[in-house]
């Protein structure tokens, strides 16, 4: 589900400070007229005239606050000039064109005392025109900005969509909140645009949605908050928010909270084709503000120029009903249908760290051949199964989850979009360990070790038992050069796993040629397992264009403690699998398994 993105219209914490502090022994003379108090992050606008070319604003600061102040021209031929005075009336900073073109900006101003600071704004040209002012109190790593041109003239437009009815899919939830809570905020963000345009937005759970929204890793906390691709971009319709941020759903409660509603509504503007605006009151202003939650006049003018006027709407939660958040014990069951129009459905469930869950997908009618996939919040595949439940049903038994959070079950059919089976199914999620069948043992086919029992398996065991890789806290990486990778995981003493090291190509003849120069070795606590216990399957098409051979053993009867398992793929020469070239050498996969 992951895809490469072009970062366009991203929201980030900007750390490239332009210092403009002038320790000038000038004293602020109180201007005649009212001094208007303002708040951090909340834009204000005003009007200069030939007879009134100055204004004064006040803001309450504290020692150590680092400020960025932006004064922008929004109309007319004005040339803004900005001055900042401390509580004693001393000038501590001033700027003319630091914001680009005629705009003024002071960045990196660190306040030395608590008190009321005064901001004097002036039009040097003494003419008529509008301006906007915003003061941002910076986080530790810098002020928050939307990435993009800072000297844009009001709204800018990308190419619009060629339709006014758009579908969107929310892949996962904001960390710390439920899917339903996240879904509601996303719907509110879309509704803000639907209220001022004829655009209609419908939530779906299909892979062909116009707009894809997800939380994932971008660059860690306090930097890029989110990124979106407008219709003119190669990645049009993709939105990603950084899961590492300190997200809140709507209004911030603490100093470093980031409002999902504010960021999402801005990013969705990019998705519709709006670029950045120079109007500080605009939702599309490049500086983050939790107060800018709905399109302002400038935003409305831009979106209506692309799509016309009118009122649209939002249809959220129109996807198949999701399973409710389960308790830590018991069973949740749902029924639904897979056919050519809906060949895959997604169901969310939550678990606690270390919890064990079993998932089954059984056919109720038709010729459906169920297939299960479990995905984490970052869209990484944790486990999958085709026929372990018997009679072509799918089952993932005793999956252990290393982290607390929401996970997703993809319920589909064998060969997915390319498959042709259809029918009703029942999906069940059982919490807590369940008893598994023991592997068949015969004389000479079992090797007991001090920690785990190794058995020879048969082809049916590949779907009967869980893959060993499903216990890992993170999957092994695909590497084109010899290396050693090490991962950790946990098992229970009664669990049975398939320890498999497959090799695949896109052609059966190529696979046979590869196998002549490839060897698989398994080790338990640095002792090699006898080759007679390693089963190698016949080449088999996987339905995804690949032909694979599996090399595996069965692991059961674990003893408390730690087991070191090592699988090595030895390539005697460079091998081409039809897609990539793998360099000759040893590819080593080490498992540090904790038995409970």
Image (cartoon, rainbow, N blue to C red):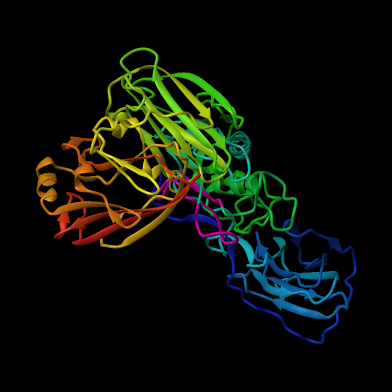
Residue 450 placement, left or right of 112 = left
Residue 119 drawn in magenta? no
Q: Which residue is more in the foreground, 537 or 302?
A: 537
Q: Which residue is more in the foreground, 198 or 33?
A: 198
Question: How many numbered discs sit on the rendered protein?
Answer: 0
Q: What is the quadrant of residue 391 in the picture?
A: top left
Q: Position of residue 23 (x, y in %)?
A: 76, 85
Q: What is the quadrant of residue 127 in the picture?
A: bottom right
- Quarter placement of the N terminus: top left
Q: Main secondary structure of the magenta part?
A: loop
Q: Position of residue 245 (x, y in %)?
A: 60, 54
Q: Residue furthest top?
A: 365
Q: Position of residue 131 (x, y in %)?
A: 70, 61
Q: Residue furthest bottom?
A: 25
Q: Residue drawn at (23%, 38%), measured in percent from left and top?
A: 444
User: Which segment is the magenta one?
Assistant: 217-243
Q: Residue drawn at (68%, 54%), measured in percent from left and top?
A: 289
Q: Is residue 379 visible?
A: yes
Q: Which residue is more in the foreground, 243 or 117?
A: 243
Q: What is the quadrant of residue 479 in the picture?
A: bottom left
Residue 351 vs 430, above or below: the answer is: below
Q: Is residue 210 visible?
A: no
Residue 236 drawn in magenta? yes
Q: Position of residue 249 (x, y in %)?
A: 66, 44
Q: Residue drawn at (29%, 32%), measured in percent from left and top?
A: 441
Residue 290 placement, left or right of 243 = right
Residue 386 vs 263, above or below: the answer is: above
Residue 196 vs 317, above or below: the answer is: below
Residue 438 placement, left or right of 501 = right
Q: Which residue is more in the foreground, 183 or 25?
A: 183
């Amino acid at each position: 589900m992951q895809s490469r993105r072009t970062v366009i219209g991203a929201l980030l914490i900007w750390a490239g400070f332009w210092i403009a502090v002038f320790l000038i022994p000038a004293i602020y003379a109180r201007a005649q007229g009212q001094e208007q108090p303002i708040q951090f992050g909340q834009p204000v606008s005003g009007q200069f005239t030939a007879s009134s070319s100055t204004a004064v604003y006040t803001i309450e600061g504290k020692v150590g606050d680092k400020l960025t102040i932006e004064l922008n021209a929004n109309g007319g031929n004005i040339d803004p000039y900005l001055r900042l005075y401390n509580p004693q009336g001393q000038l501590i900073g001033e700027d003319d064109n630091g914001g680009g073109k005629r705009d003024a900006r002071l960045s990196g101003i660190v306040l030395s005392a608590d008190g009321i600071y005064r901001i004097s704004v002036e039009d040097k040209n003494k003419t008529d025109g509008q301006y906007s002012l915003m003061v941002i109190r910076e986080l530790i790593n810098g002020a928050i900005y939307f990435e993009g041109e800072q000297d844009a003239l009001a709204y800018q437009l990308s190419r619009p969509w060629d339709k006014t009815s758009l579908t969107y899919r929310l892949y996962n939830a904001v960390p710390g909140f439920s899917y339903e809570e996240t879904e509601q905020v996303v719907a509110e963000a879309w509704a803000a645009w639907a209220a001022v345009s004829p655009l209609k937005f419908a939530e779906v759970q299909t892979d062909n949605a116009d707009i894809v929204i997800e939380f994932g890793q971008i660059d860690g906390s306090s930097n890029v908050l989110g990124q979106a691709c407008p219709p003119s971009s190669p990645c049009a319709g993709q939105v990603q928010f950084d899961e590492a941020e300190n997200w809140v759903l709507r209004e911030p409660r603490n100093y470093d909270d980031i409002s999902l509603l504010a960021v999402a509504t801005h990013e969705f503007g990019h998705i519709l084709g709006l670029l950045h605006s120079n109007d500080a009151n605009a939702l599309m202003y490049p500086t983050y503000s939790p107060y800018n939650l709905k399109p302002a006049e400038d935003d409305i003018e831009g979106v209506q120029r692309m799509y016309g006027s009118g009122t649209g709407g939002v249809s959220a939660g129109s996807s198949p009903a999701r399973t409710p958040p389960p308790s830590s014990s018991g069973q949740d069951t749902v029924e639904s249908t897979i056919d050519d129009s809906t060949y895959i459905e997604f169901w969310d469930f939550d678990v606690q760290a270390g919890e064990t869950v079993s998932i089954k997908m059984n056919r109720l009618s038709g010729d459906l051949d169920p297939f299960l996939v479990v995905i984490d919040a970052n869209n990484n595949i944790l486990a999958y199964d085709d026929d372990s439940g018997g009679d072509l049903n799918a089952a993932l038994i005793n999956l252990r989850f290393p982290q607390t959070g929401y996970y997703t079950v993809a319920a589909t059919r064998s060969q997915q979009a390319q498959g042709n089976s259809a029918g009703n199914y029942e999906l069940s999620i059982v919490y807590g360990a369940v008893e598994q069948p023991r592997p068949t043992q015969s004389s000479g086919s079992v090797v007991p070790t001090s920690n785990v029992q190794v058995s020879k398996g048969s082809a049916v065991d590949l779907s009967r038992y869980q893959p060993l890789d499903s216990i890992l806290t993170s999957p092994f990486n695909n590497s084109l050069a010899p290396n050693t990778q090490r991962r950790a995981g946990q098992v229970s003493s009664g669990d049975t796993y398939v320890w498999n090291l497959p090799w695949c190509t896109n052609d059966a003849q190529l696979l046979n040629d590869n196998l002549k120069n490839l060897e698989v070795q398994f080790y338990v606590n640095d002792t090699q397992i006898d080759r007679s216990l390693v089963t190698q399957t016949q080449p088999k098409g996987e339905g995804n264009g690949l032909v694979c051979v599996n090399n595996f053993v069965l692991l059961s009867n674990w003893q408390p403690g730690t087991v070191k398992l090592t699988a090595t793929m030895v390539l005697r020469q460079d091998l081409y699998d039809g897609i990539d070239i793998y360099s000759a050498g040893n590819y080593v996969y080490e498992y540090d398994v904790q038995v409970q």
